[in-house]
Image (cartoon, rainbow, N blue to C red):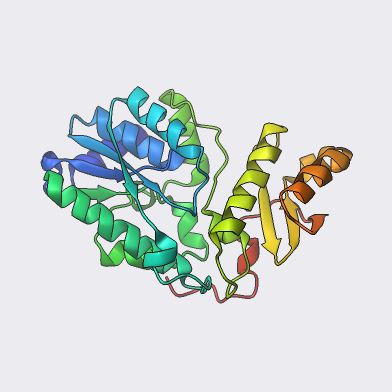
């Protein structure tokens, strides 16, 4: 059974009995890893990265979820824009960010005597442009879901079976993915994007991206929700204009992961 295999994977890491430190976003992947860590009988600590690149309101949900799973919860405040060298959103941004974050996670774990670093990378992530995976390898971070070959669909099924409440939660990659590469990452723009997506989520579009092309906002929602979003265009236009976007467009190709990666080489992991 997959669940038993996951727990065995965690228990099998060298010095796992000293404790697991799980990079925890509050999404389904890291929640499944954390739930398995808690059920393994090993000491487990969930660590949330609070940064300008992640929606602010995710933190409270992550803390509540970790508490419900029975894990300790800590927050690391990280200023990636200042520390990771990503001010101009380079194509290897993900590598630079991951390396910074997991170096800080490693230092945190060492201070508390936790010996194993884990994250929620799944097997599907290995098929996409993810420069950050190289940083995980360099820093000896374990990705038990990917190591077992578990794809996103299987992870969601495990979450449902174990009663993890975020089993259906849409993925929410960092806000820097909403801007074109080699354009400045300004804190004000990231905040605007986050607020715009929060507004659309409050309208019921739970899977949504607001991509920024200078003053133009390109909204992506799943194909089946394009018509409903278009029907709310006046309300959406008003809010987006108030947030400071000059132009507002609906992407007819719908929501797709990595749409800003078009044209980049698919290697470099």
Q: Nearer the viewer, residue 2 or 108?
A: 108
Residue drawn at 40 percent across, 28 percent down: 65
Residue 35 placement, left or right of 177: left
Query: Where residue 149 appears, x then y in whole percent?
Result: 40, 50
Residue 190 at x, y = what percent?
A: 58, 55
**Which residue occupies 68% across, 58% down?**
211
Q: Quadrant of residue 62?
A: top left
At 33% from the left edge and 64% from the top edge, which residue is drawn?
99
Q: Quadrant of the N terminus?
A: top left
Quadrant housing the C terminus: bottom left
Q: Image check: 33 left or right of 123?
A: left
Whether residue 141 can be seen here: no
Identified at 72% across, 45% down, the residue is: 222
Residue 263: x percent and y percent? 64, 75
32, 176: nearer the viewer: 176
Instruction: Using the rendered view, name the quadrant where residue 17 is placed.
Output: top left
On the rendered structure, is 248 left or right of 199? Answer: right
Question: Does 32 sit above or below residue 136?
Answer: above
- Of residues 118 and 157, the one nearer the viewer is 118
Residue 215 visible: yes
Figure disc tally: 0
**Residue 176, above or below 46:** below
Question: Looking at the picture, how far across and down is residue 167, in whole percent?
Answer: 50, 31
């Amino acid at each position: 059974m997959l669940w038993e295999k996951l727990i065995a994977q965690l228990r099998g890491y060298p010095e796992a009995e000293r404790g697991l430190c799980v990079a925890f976003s509050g999404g389904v992947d890291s929640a499944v890893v954390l739930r398995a860590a808690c059920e393994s009988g090993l000491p487990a600590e969930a660590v949330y990265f609070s940064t300008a690149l992640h929606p602010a309101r995710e933190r409270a949900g992550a803390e509540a979820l970790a508490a419900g799973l029975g894990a300790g919860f800590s927050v690391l405040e990280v200023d990636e824009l200042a520390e990771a060298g990503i001010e101009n959103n380079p194509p290897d941004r993900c590598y630079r960010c991951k390396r910074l974050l997991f170096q800080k996670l490693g230092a945190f774990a060492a201070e508390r005597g936790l010996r194993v670093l884990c994250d929620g990378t799944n097997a599907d992530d290995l098929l996409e442009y993810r420069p950050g995976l190289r940083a995980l390898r360099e820093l000896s971070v374990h990705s038990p879901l990917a190591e077992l070959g578990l794809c996103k669909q299987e992870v969601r099924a495990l979450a449902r079976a174990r009663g993890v409440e975020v089993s259906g939660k849409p993925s929410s990659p960092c806000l820097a993915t909403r801007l074109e590469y080699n354009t400045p990452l300004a804190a004000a723009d990231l905040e605007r994007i986050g607020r715009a997506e929060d507004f659309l989520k409050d309208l019921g579009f739970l899977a949504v991206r607001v991509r920024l092309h200078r003053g133009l906002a390109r909204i992506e929602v799943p194909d089946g929700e394009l018509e409903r979003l278009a029907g709310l265009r006046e309300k959406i236009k008003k809010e987006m204009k108030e947030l400071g976007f000059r132009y507002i467009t609906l992407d007819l190709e719908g929501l797709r992961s990595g749409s800003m990666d078009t044209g980049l080489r698919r290697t470099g992991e």
